[in-house]
Image: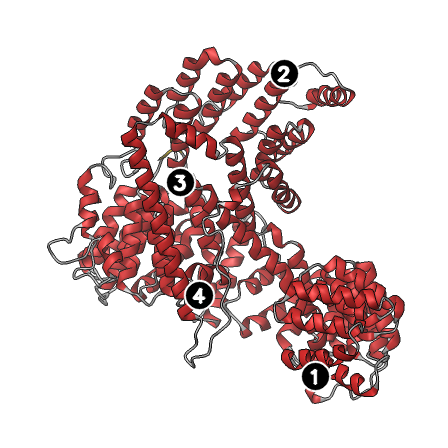
């Protein structure tokens, strides 16, 4: 570096490099300018000056200087290396790799460049290149531990575990017998555990177990040692030894459910389906009774038997488990018991048990068969549990009665209001649920969880403004929206995006959904620093797990929701593009002069409000830009498009969906929604074969799903209505469809009308299947609209068996009934039928605000008035709480919604 310079300037060049490494950028610039005064065309100095400017956020100048430097000295590995570092800082990893390779052509043994190249190859999963680079590094520096480990890991990632084991053994052969010293025992123990996990992965189980016992004294992490040992023993079929190890592990942590599951496997008492024979149940019961005597403080040893016990034994065990928790007052008890509701008959048993407990406490003040009195709070927690139980079974009126009784008993318990809000949400009254959640929040202003639940309820009720004001109570001062974004608060962004989408505010909805997508891109980038850190610190097992996690990162549920939401926004944007300026002018010209004036006044007011808000945000950012010391901090750039308006200005919304659709197809191929979206996109694009591929995937996943049926019928109806193929490509597509159609069992030997009729007969007891059949009947034969409506209206809300505690439960679900109402109103376009359906559903769902049920909070204007006014007892209403700031209510009850109780 700087070899072509005189000694004085060469020392200055070294100072530039040192200043860059120590982040003293101004000092480095000063030294660079001193060299460039005498040698203005010195390529390496120009490149280093550019790299320094890049760190000072002067990117345009940086790229110009680095390119000038490279042009002046194409044979310098420093210039190419710097150019690669510049690309790397902008996450242009493929371009950076090209630059590093050019640098290595000039200086093939440069360790620093090789190390940087290997990090990028690991990041981009260029595993073949990664192996080659790590081998070159090991050849150049064989006495460096990190090079040995890096070479082994590279082979492991490249699916060559056996070679990785050989490399690790060769590395161990270079060590002395008394290695490691005390300060390296942890790192060396981690390396040994990594090697044993590799042996296990490659199937060398006996060898792995032998190695584990041989190196036991060198492994510091004794818990990991035991877990690795028992894993090998079980895989080798040595279940007796495995049982002993699991019992040792239970002494270390008797609340670890995995250890109990492993113990059951070793005793051959494990069932994938959860079904056990009577002999197995007796053996399991004996096992857990003995474990319960040994670990009396463990909750897991008491809870697990509830999963396999039946009849009276279940009742007895459940009573022993529930009673102490009710006495203690554990709010999460129902969440703990809720998986039991999927077991046949156990919900009945639980209801009987809880009702007996309630009756006993009411009459005697104690549990049945006991003399000692229970504290008064036990009745309240029993009512609390019963309310959640009835909510789970869909009996919202009884659930509300129970929770109201609990609130009357103890008005100061926050969880009661949260659960009442949850019941109302399930019943369909979202505004009331949001108000109750806000009441709970106002009772404990320091609880972030309750604040977050309140925000979630508000977003579900489409109260986005109130939700934002509530959410920022737990953010730092300043730019609150950016603060939530910086915290990667994805649940908020998703819920907010869904709310904006429901309100047809596509710009803001897209803004939120794409923010979540950006978080996942950042997570992918965040792994970069760990490629060197994990090799240096020897956290090899965690490193490999992290890389595997990163490879399946986009299969996460949050990303799926965000990508699907963005695609739905673009589809809606394609179907209903925003009006152009000329169209808006044409509409304005049709208005009366008085209407025009009103419209202009509204626009001016909106512009004034937007300007005022912008000025306020600018003042806040200026205020927060100055620290307490008086020094100005680095201000964050202001968002130029806060409302997502620029996101709507796309020429082809369908092309924007491609990126997200490909990620969903790659990482969420087993999701029905992925292929439904693929079908919708490709039908609009006229990509016939891709749409057909989506239909086949839907039929593979769930042929009886109403949406799969819709797509199948719509596809072949669309194909049948298209003009005869003219070009060779069209003829080829048609020949493919003709060859594939007979293989579809749904259409084999049937017309579309017959297939739809068969689907209806097969699923005529299901509301959603009837709705799908009716919709497709209307699509195929529009003149039979009345028959299609009759199919829907003839469906009966029959009781269905649910293995539940409350006997039969009605089949119709609120969400399904809402979608049927929208179908009648927007697709079949029959306002009378939609009105009749709404009236029926208002009876079935009396709390639903959508259907204006007689117990909902929107049944009359007075409900809204009550929210705004201050009740007589001084407890603030919902809106007033948010405007004036929350205050603790005198009686702990939300007066605005007292009329919602039955």
Instruction: Tell me: residue 425, above or below residue 380.
Output: above
Between the C-alphas of marks 2 and 3, the distance is: 36 Å
- Closer to the camera, 604 or 172? 604
Q: Mark 1 points at which residue?
A: 185
> For residue 503, which numbered disc appears in the image?
3
Q: Mark 4 points at which residue?
A: 299
Between the C-alphas of marks 3 and 1, the distance is: 60 Å
| Mark 1 Cα-neighbour bin, 10 Å: few <14, some 14–19, many ≥20 | some
Residue 158 horizontal side relative to residue 755, left or right: right
Q: Residue 519 at what x, y percent from top left?
A: 56, 57
Badge 1 or badge 2: first in the primary sequence: 1
Residue in view at x 39 percent, y 65 percent? 620
Give the secondary structure at mark 2.
helix
Tags 2 and 3 touching, CB below 8 Å: no
Q: Which of marks 1 and 2 is in front?
A: 2
Residue in view at x 77 percent, y 65 percent? 68
Q: Mark 2 points at which residue?
A: 720
Q: Nearer the viewer, mark 1 or mark 4?
A: 1
Instruction: Tell me: residue 49, above or below residue 822.
Output: below
> For residue 93, which numbered disc appears in the image?
none
């Amino acid at each position: 570096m700087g070899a072509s310079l005189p000694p004085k300037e060469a020392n200055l060049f070294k100072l530039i490099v040192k200043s860059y490494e120590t982040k003293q950028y101004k000092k480095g610039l000063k030294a660079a300018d001193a060299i460039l005064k005498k040698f203005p065309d010195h390529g390496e100095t120009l490149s280093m000056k550019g790299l320094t400017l890049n760190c000072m956020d002067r990117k345009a100048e940086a790229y110009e200087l680095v390119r000038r430097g490279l042009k002046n000295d194409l044979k310098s590995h420093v210039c190419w290396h710097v150019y690669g570092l510049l690309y790397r800082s902008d996450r242009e990893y493929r371009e950076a790799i090209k630059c590093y390779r050019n640098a290595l052509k000039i200086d093939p043994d440069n360790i620093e460049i090789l190390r940087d190249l290997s990090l990028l190859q690991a990041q981009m999963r260029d595993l073949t290149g990664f192996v080659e680079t790590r081998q070159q590094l090991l050849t150049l520096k064989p006495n460096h531990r990190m090079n040995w480990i890096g070479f082994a890991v590279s082979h492991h990632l490249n699916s060559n575990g056996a070679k990785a084991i050989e490399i690790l053994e060769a590395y161990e052969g270079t060590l002395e017998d008394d290695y490691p010293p005390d300060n390296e025992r942890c790192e060396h123990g981690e390396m040994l555990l990594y090697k044993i996990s590799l042996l296990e992965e490659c199937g060398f189980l006996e060898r792995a177990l032998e190695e584990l016992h041989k190196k036991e004294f060198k492994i510091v992490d004794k818990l990991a040692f035991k877990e690795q040992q028992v894993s090998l023993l079980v895989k080798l079929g040595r279940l007796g030894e495995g049982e002993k190890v699991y019992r040792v592990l239970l002494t270390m942590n008797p609340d670890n459910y995995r250890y109990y599951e492993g113990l059951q496997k070793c005793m051959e008492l494990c069932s994938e389906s959860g079904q056990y024979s009577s002999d197995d149940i007796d053996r399991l019961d004996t096992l857990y009774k003995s474990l319960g005597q040994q670990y009396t403080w463990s909750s897991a040893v008491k809870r697990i038997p509830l999963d396999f016990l039946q009849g009276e034994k279940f009742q007895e065990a459940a009573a022993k488990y529930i009673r102490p928790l009710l006495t203690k007052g554990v709010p999460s008890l129902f969440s703990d018991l809720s998986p039991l509701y999927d077991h046949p008959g156990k919900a009945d048993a639980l209801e009987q048990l809880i009702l007996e407990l309630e009756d006993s406490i009411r009459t005697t003040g104690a549990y049945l068969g006991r003399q000692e009195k229970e504290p008064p709070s036990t009745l309240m927690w029993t009512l609390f549990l019963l309310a959640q139980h009835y909510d789970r079974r869909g009996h919202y009126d009884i659930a509300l009665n129970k929770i109201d009784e609990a609130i009357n008993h103890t008005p100061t318990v926050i969880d009661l209001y949260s659960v009442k809000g949850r019941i109302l949400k399930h019943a369909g009254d979202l505004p009331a649920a949001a108000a109750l959640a806000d009441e709970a929040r106002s009772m404990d202003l320091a609880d972030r969880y309750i604040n977050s639940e309140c925000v979630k309820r508000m977003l579900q009720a489409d109260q986005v403004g109130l939700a934002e004001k509530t959410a920022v109570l737990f953010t730092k001062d300043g730019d609150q929206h950016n603060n939530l974004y910086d915290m990667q608060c994805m649940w908020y962004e998703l819920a907010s995006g869904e709310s904006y989408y429901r309100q047809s505010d596509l710009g803001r909805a897209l803004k939120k959904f794409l923010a979540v997508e950006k978080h996942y891109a950042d997570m992918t980038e965040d792994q970069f620093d760990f490629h060197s850190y994990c090799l240096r610190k020897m956290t090899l097992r965690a490193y490999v797990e992290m890389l595997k996690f990163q490879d399946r990162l986009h299969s996460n549920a949050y990303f799926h929701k965000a990508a699907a939401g963005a695609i739905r926004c673009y589809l809606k944007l394609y179907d209903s593009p925003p009006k152009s300026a000329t169209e808006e002018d044409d509409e304005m010209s049709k208005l009366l002069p008085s209407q025009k004036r009103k419209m202009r006044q509204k626009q001016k007011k909106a512009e004034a409000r937007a300007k005022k808000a912008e000025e306020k945000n600018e003042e806040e950012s200026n205020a927060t830009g100055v620290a307490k010391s008086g020094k100005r901090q680095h201000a964050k750039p202001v968002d130029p498009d806060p409302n997502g308006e620029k996101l709507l200005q796309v020429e082809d919304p369908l092309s924007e969906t491609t990126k997200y659709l490909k990620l969903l197809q790659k990482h969420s191929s087993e999701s029905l929604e992925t292929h439904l979206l693929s079908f919708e996109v490709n039908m609009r694009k006229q990509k016939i074969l891709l749409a057909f591929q989506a239909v086949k995937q839907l039929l593979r996943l769930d042929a009886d799903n109403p949406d799969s049926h819709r797509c199948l019928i719509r596809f072949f109806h669309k194909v049948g209505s298209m003009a005869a193929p003219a070009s060779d490509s069209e003829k080829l597509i048609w020949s493919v469809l003709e060859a594939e159609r007979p293989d579809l069992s749904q259409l084999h030997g049937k017309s579309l009308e017959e297939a739809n009729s068969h689907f209806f007969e097969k699923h005529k007891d299901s509301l959603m299947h009837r709705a799908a059949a009716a919709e497709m009947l209307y699509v195929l034969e529009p003149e039979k609209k009345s028959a299609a409506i009759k199919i829907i209206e003839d469906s009966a809300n029959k009781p269905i068996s649910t293995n539940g505690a409350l006997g039969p439960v009605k089949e119709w679900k609120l969400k399904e009934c809402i979608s049927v109402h929208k179908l009648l109103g927007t697709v079949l376009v029959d306002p009378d039928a939609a009105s009749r359906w709404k009236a029926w559903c208002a009876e079935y769902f009396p709390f639903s605000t959508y259907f204006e049920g007689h117990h909902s909070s929107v049944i009359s204007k007075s409900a809204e008035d009550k929210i705004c006014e201050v009740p007589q007892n001084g407890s603030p209403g919902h809106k007033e709480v948010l405007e004036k700031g929350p205050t603790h209510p005198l009686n702990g009850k939300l007066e605005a919604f007292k009329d919602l109780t039955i």
